[in-house]
Amino acid sequence: MCSSDLLGRNELLAPAPEGSKHAIRTLRRPRAFYGRSPNYSHLFGIPRFKLFIFPSLMKSSVQISRGIESLFGTRDENIRLLESELNLRTRLLDGDSLELEGEDRQVQRAQEILEDYVSLVMEGQVFNNGDLNSYLRVVTADPDASLRRLVESGKSRTFGKKVLAPKTVNQRRYVDAIEHHDLTIGIGPAGTGKTYLAVAMAVSALLNKRVSRIVLTRPAVEAGEHLGFLPGTLQEKVDPYLRPLYDALFDMIDSERVEKLIERNVIEIAPLAFMRGRTLNDCFIILDEAQNTTVEQMKMILTRQGFNSKMVVNGDQTQIDLPAGRKSGLLNAAEVLKRVEGIAFVNFDERDVVRHALVQRIVKAYDRYNEMTGAGRQLALRLGSDIAQETPAEPPAATAVEIPEFPSLA
């Protein structure tokens, strides 16, 4: 019976006074108490009871004259994201007006976002596939974020033949950190653009002649499996491990030009083991998959940086493929270098994933599972230590030892 369908927004259900023929009666909620739980027990002489307060709903509409297709997105993914994150319902009216229904605060927030979208589209802003969805994830999660500020601060840049723009707040911080620091360490889950944006910044620095070379490296560690001996030359053996770096390069530079730059050693792609003993001057260095470096390897590569060089270190702390008992160099560097001046740390999370929307939910589910199992293991260890402390060890039972008598030598 306590349903928003039966009661008005300013009405409450309360027990009726003794002797009344009704079991309950409806109270009109005073406006001064709206949004709180007042105590009406003094009216009936009964103990305080729980009052149900139903949030007020409002409707509003936003005129969308252009860009209705990109607003809805593929399979209405953008509108569904807006509805789920702000807990409201939408309805398209007359083809160019969107009706919003929900709580006052959430409807007003959605209205601000949509008004920013309409004005940006009218000014000529084009939202490519997936861009608007990434922006909406940020602005719906952060009440202080603005769609307009997010788009304007992440203006597109040209990286070779590719035009890119940071799609999330952390991606923008990441690009800014690379521009203003000689060493940037990016830590976060898969699909957040760590490698891709780092390669894009390296290509931009090379084409603008800010550096003379690009050095791309990563540890040659299999993802939980042993491939055995691979056929071919040394380069052919390590190429499968470096393929993600090639893919990013081919996206930004023509493949023929990439091959020529590799032949001239302007772009060098090599496993981490080849970096020992070198000094890398006037180049842009990228260490990818840094979570699979050991502490010694991480120290080695960080001390290769020479004059007029930038270095970017990327890794995902949840995908460590090192043998059991070996500490990740990335996690160790995050502890050791966190207060060193001139080093920028950028942490990504599941909200920065720019792959399929399902990837974001997968990353979040694994994070929750790891937190639960980690907390469970710590609790078990703590309980085990407490029991060991509370239960003192019993002293060993006394045993009698018979000493034989030896004959006298006298």
Image (tube, rainbow, N blue to C red):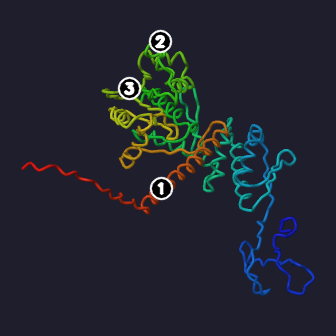
Relative image position of residue 82 (x, y in whole percent) = 72, 49
The mark nearer the N terminus, 3 or 2, is 2
Furthest residue in direction right, as rendered: 21
Contact flag, marks 3 and 2 (Cβ < 8 Å): no
Could you tell me if residue 220 is visible in this image? Answer: yes
- Write down the residue under mark 1: 384
Which amino acid, mark 1?
Gly
What residue is pinned by disc 3? 273
Q: Is residue 175 visible?
A: no
Asked if 192 appears above or below 233 in the picture, the reply is below
Dot 2, crowdedness within 10 Å: few (<14), some or many (≥20)? few
Task: Where is residue 285? Give x, y as percent.
Answer: 41, 31
Q: Quadrant of residue 255?
A: top right
40 displayed left or right of 254: right
Q: Secondary structure at mark 2?
A: loop
Count the labels in the image: 3
- Looking at the picture, how far across and down is residue 149, in whole percent? 60, 49
Residue found at x 81% / y 73% = 10
Residue found at the very far left of the displayed protein? 410
Q: Position of residue 274 (x, y in %)?
A: 37, 24
Q: Which residue is mark 2?
A: 232
Q: Is residue 224 above or below residue 333?
A: above
Mark carried by residue 126:
none
Disc 3 from disc 1: Cα separation: 43 Å
How far apart are labels 3 and 2 at the CA level?
19 Å
Amino acid type shown at disc 3: Ala
The image quarter in which residue 302 lies: top left
- Between discs 3 and 1, the one toward the N terminus: 3
